[in-house]
Image (tube, rainbow, N blue to C red):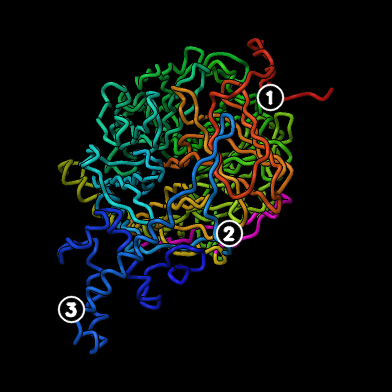
Amino acid sequence: MPWLHGRRGRPPLLGLRRCRVALFARLGLHYVKAHGIFGLFRVQPGDMHFLPTLQFHRTWKKRSRVEAALAGRKRLFFCLLFIGMVAALYAGQTPSDWHQEGSARWMTLPVPPQGASGFVLLPPLVTGLFFTNTLDEWSSAANRVLENGSGVAAGDYDHDGLPDLFLCHLQGKSALYRNRGGWSFEEVTRPAGIEVAGQTCRGAVFADVNGDGGLDLLISTLGQGVLCFFNDGAGKFTNGTPHAGTQTRYGSMTMALADVDGNGTLDLYVANYRAEDIRDRSRVEVQIVNGQMVLPPMYRDRLILIPGGLWEYGEPDILYLNDGRGHFTAADWTNGVFRTTEGESLAQVPRDWGLTATFRDLNGDGFPDLYVCNDYWTPDRIWLNDGRGHFRAAAALAIRHTSENSMGVDFADINRDGHLDFLVLDMLSRDPFLRRRQVLAQTMMASTPGEMDNRPQIMRNTLFLNRGDGTFAEIADYAGLPASDWSWQPVFIDVDLDGYEDLIIPAGHTRDVQDLDATLKIKSRQHSWPKDMEPQARQEQFTREMMQNVRLYPPLLLPIVALRNLGNCRFEEVTDRWGTSSQGVHQGIAWADFDGDGDLDFVVNNLNGVCGVYRNETAAPRIAVRLIGRAPNTQGIGARVKLLGGAVPEQSQEVVCGGRYLSGFDPLLVFAAGTNQGGMIIQVTWRTGRQSTVNGVQPNRLYEIDAAGAVDVPRPNLPAREAQTDSRTAGIKRPG
């Protein structure tokens, strides 16, 4: 029944201006999927999921006196008509049969015949996702760390072919949502065995950490480290944190997983921030020894004295090595797993303000390298993997400077030259007028004239173009990307499917705490506190004044910034055109194909606002690829997938797990097919070095490729550990 469908060949959205019959069928479809077709005869007025349909049905009846007179016959007629329409809609969404070709299989994707590039924000009444990550004023004033928000994870935990969601909450109301199809989600947190009441949940990722084929759920928390819930394979979870060994007292943030040592298991890196910020304390005691300020022993690993004040260290990140059964052992920072640029073991544990960490093969040797985004004055870390799980700091001259307040990072070959480039986000406003009103987030550190290997930090975004020799040119200004406001996570994704990855950037903050006018007014309110004041009363009064001061800052509600890749290392802003201009505090973001049409949609966790669900409207031809890895790496994490002969000669993406700000994506890859009607090739290089090739690839298909059919190919021997070299140039390739 084509008249039931919207522009994209799908049931239209809820709205009083749309066809009322289609609306009735749309809501009924959700009910049928939950209760079965005969559940329509058992519907009760108290059924909240179906209530909007009943209410509208009654309103519709009031508009027709004829129908009111023939109520009995009309109700029966429309009930039967409704059942038929729902059955037709339901049957129309059944996926095509799979076709096996060697170690791969494919199915045809239900690609819409037409559609503009961009997204549509779906209302909660359609999706059932009313989730709101709330943070009250008092909690925010008492612990500013909470304002960094929470994330979201996407993954098919129940093996029904539809990606599900886990949304993190700062105040104990995190939730698991099952995707029922048709853009309908139901909350199943407790039935699924997820119990996180009372926990401050920051980030999440679905990952098969014990190699049994079921997606387990990892949740980073404030003050409890990482919680690990094991999936029994039937969609039921058990809290296995004691077995996993990932609970700590740290304020954990983003999690990234990869097989760092080549043994087939997914290891876990946790970026830790802090559970609380010392600036939120009413008093910090220091001692005077021989006329000099000295920190008490309790602060010696946390604070550092500087002229005019204090600096605070963050907490150590943790690399957990997996034994293959979901039990993790923390690697020692100083025993040779991590090394300096000279190849020496670290002398001390880095105590950075970790926000995001991600694994990518940065230098093209097939091994997962590690980039860590650190906040404030602590520097970003770039660790190159030797394939055995030993990480060496990148050469000082490989990258000349980094962002100051690095929030998130993502990687893509932005100019299709075969080398991986990357973007790191900071907080610089796009509005020149606003910039003039803002004070710098950090005090610029002085540098010595002529110094060239110090890698200074700058307060703006940084885009690094890979030269192919182990060094990167920083081109954010040239590309038009130096600023994206207070932004959290860049996502490279080919929205318009032209062969070049575009950018989607969630942004926003509760308050513009860089506002200079408010800052000066707050400074004028500063005062001393009585020395004999009771500590608890002093802390409560301090927090109360902090809350009042924060109100002086203006709100900083921002859009999700969208930028189109022009293919020449330049980007143009298309936020309004692509439908992401809704204002809010957009933080963690997760991407997945929620409706099965082969393009990537996204969900964003908004602070103090209902989560955003965005449907991808693009109708361009595409190739979707999902990998079936060999246990224990069942999703093929770390594999590199290439499409040859699509919209551009070569497209390449890496299958990753976690590694986005507080979030994890479903590992489906989507490539642009362009006008090519066939003869394309998919090449997969697995983490093991083996390769799979699929020939005769056709557009608008989903391909599942199994590692069981991969073949061995020659791979260069792992290099011997390098002798001590110049730290400025170690790892940089020389011509000739």
The magenta-colored residue range is: 552-575
Residue 469 is left or right of residue 209, and the answer is: right
Q: Of tags 1 and 2, which is closer to the observer?
A: 2
Farthest residue in the right direction? 736
Of labels 1 and 2, earlier in sequence is 2
Locate the N terminus and report the quarter of the image it occupies.
bottom left
The answer for how far apart the CA atoms under marks 1 and 2 are is 48 Å
Locate the C terminus and report the quarter of the image it occupies.
top right
Above or below residue 567? Residue 64 is: below
268 within the magenta span: no
Which one is in front, 155 or 84? Answer: 84
Residue carrying label 1: 728
Residue carrying label 2: 619
Residue carrying label 3: 72
Q: Residue at x 67, y 19 (%)?
A: 713
Q: Residue at x 41, y 39 (%)?
A: 309
Residue 81 spot, x, y in % from top left: 31, 70
The disc labelled 1 sits on which kind of residue?
A: Arg
Residue 402 is left or right of residue 309, and the answer is: right
The disc labelled 2 sits on which kind of residue?
A: Ala
Mark number, residue 665: none
Above or below residue 496? Residue 285 is: above
Whether pointer 3 and pointer 2 mark residues with C-beta atoms closer than 8 Å, the reply is: no
